[in-house]
Amino acid sequence: MQEADRVALTKQQLEEAVANSKSLDELNGSIEVPENSGFWKTLKTFTGPGILIAVGYMDPGNWITSIAGGSQFKYKLLSVVLISSLIAMLLQSMAAKLGIVSGKDLAQLTRERTSKRMGILLWIIAELAIMATDIAEIIGSGIALELLFNIPLIMGIIITAADVLLLLVLMKLGFRKIEAIVATLVAVILLVFLYEVVLAKPDTLGILNGYVPTHSIYTNHSMLYLSLGIVGATVMPHDLYLGSSISQTRRVDRNDRKDVARAVKFSTIDSNIQLIIAFVVNSLLLILGAALFFGTNSSLGRFVDLFNALSNKQIVGAIASPLLSMLFAVALLSSGQSSTITGTLSGQIIMEGFIRLKMPLWAQRLLTRLLSVTPVLIFAIYYHGSEAKIENLLTMSQVFLSIALPFAIIPLVLFTSDKKIMGEFANKNWVKYTSWFATIVLILLNIYLILQTVGIL
């Protein structure tokens, strides 16, 4: 009996140790925060996680919808980009706060507060959402390599799959190096589209008016459908899991109320600043579509179409050049690569949080990457030579993300509003009601988008 008790106790201790393990254990609390430092020095220390979050809001999945929105309706859908960005800021600040205050990420807390079967179901949905998110990045990166270097799409997808090895190397250098590399890639995207928009000479007054919502968004069927596509491609489930985890990379004393409050404050500022950058990039994409392609009746449903159009003087006029096309491909590759880094991290967070899987980091990240790239590779081989059909997979992925979104948002709002978890940092009433309103609206819009996509409405 004593031996059996000892075995049972050991098993219980092991389960407790796994359950209480830190999110991204090798990175958790790895960055020291200087005490009694000024505002700007403290903000500098906390700056970084937000940029990893922001790349999910400007990934290749957003590009087609944003540019198509501008080409079809000029600047009118800029208001949709603005509203989507404000919702993203609200949700991401809540995700960061959840991780800092509770010391656990969204996946861990969701698993703890559900049954084993429900936990497995939610893990499968979250894992499929990661795969759906990665599809856009993998396809975008693969097509960018094809456009830049004439590398066959299938080979480009395989190369993209291997970039997980880069992440393993970066992990050895420290989390700040990862943040710096992603920030550089985001800067490339921002500068490329800023340059192209300046060349396009858009209507400044039209842009400003575009940020004011109009009733035509609701009355025009095509405009409403594209608006829903922009919203659906903006708020990503995996970013909520990621945000609740990497907010814990800064060392915080959770027994010190002031230290926790400081971490919440500066993490929120960082998140909002970086999401403003994502908002600017998405605005530039739509403005570029409006300035260059509105009224041209050009088909812009694929990355290749956009690449070719930017060098076609009959479509975009005198500014058309191979340089614009190549810069577009460089930005696409930068977007894909920055997004795959964050996608792989999100996959690890979800796997560890939901099923408490502990295995060597290199094996875990390789497994996460293979789960994402395999369906894309199979699809690419089956439809070899048909980029149009392969890019259709991107649309399908956005539909699934719409389905998976409530399974991340609802727990987030519930947990951050729970005083047992958050204490004095629980959502204030205005935050709680606003977040529930945004959640319900997002769910209803996504349901409508799904029904439209499958042809029921």
Image: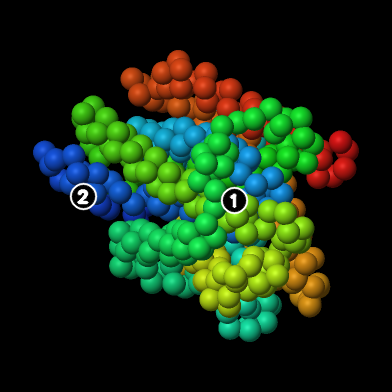
Residue 447, located in which quarter of the rendered image?
Answer: top right
Residue 441, located in which quarter of the rendered image?
Answer: top right
Number of numbered callouts drawn: 2
Report the residue at 51% width, 66% height from top. 331
Residue 408, located in which quarter of the rendered image?
Answer: top right
Residue 350 left/right relative to 128:
left
Report the residue at 18% width, 46% height from top. 41
Q: Where is residue 409 in the image (x, y as percent from the top left)?
A: 57, 34
Q: Position of residue 427 (x, y in %)?
A: 42, 22
Is residue 448 visible to us here?
yes
Residue at mark 1:
286
* Color theme of the render: rainbow
Residue 224 left/right relative to 319:
right
Q: Reading the chain from its start, which is encountered first: label 2 or label 1?
A: 2
Instruction: Return the mark for residue 32.
Output: 2
Q: How far apart are marks 2 and 1 (CA)?
A: 40 Å
Give SS at disc 2: loop
Q: How crowded is mark 1: few (under 14 residues within 10 Å), some or many (20 or more)?
A: many
Instruction: Return the mark for residue 424.
Output: none
Q: Position of residue 187 (x, y in %)?
A: 40, 61
Q: Which of label 2 and label 1 is nearer to you?
A: 1
Return the residue nearer the eye: 250 or 220.
220
Please tell me whether residue 301 is drawn above or below residue 40 in the rendered image.
below
Quarter of the rendering occupied by the C terminus: top right
Q: Which amino acid does label 1 sit on?
A: Leu
Report the residue at 69% width, 66% height from top. 315
Report the residue at 40% width, 47% height from top. 274
Q: Which amino acid does label 2 sit on?
A: Glu
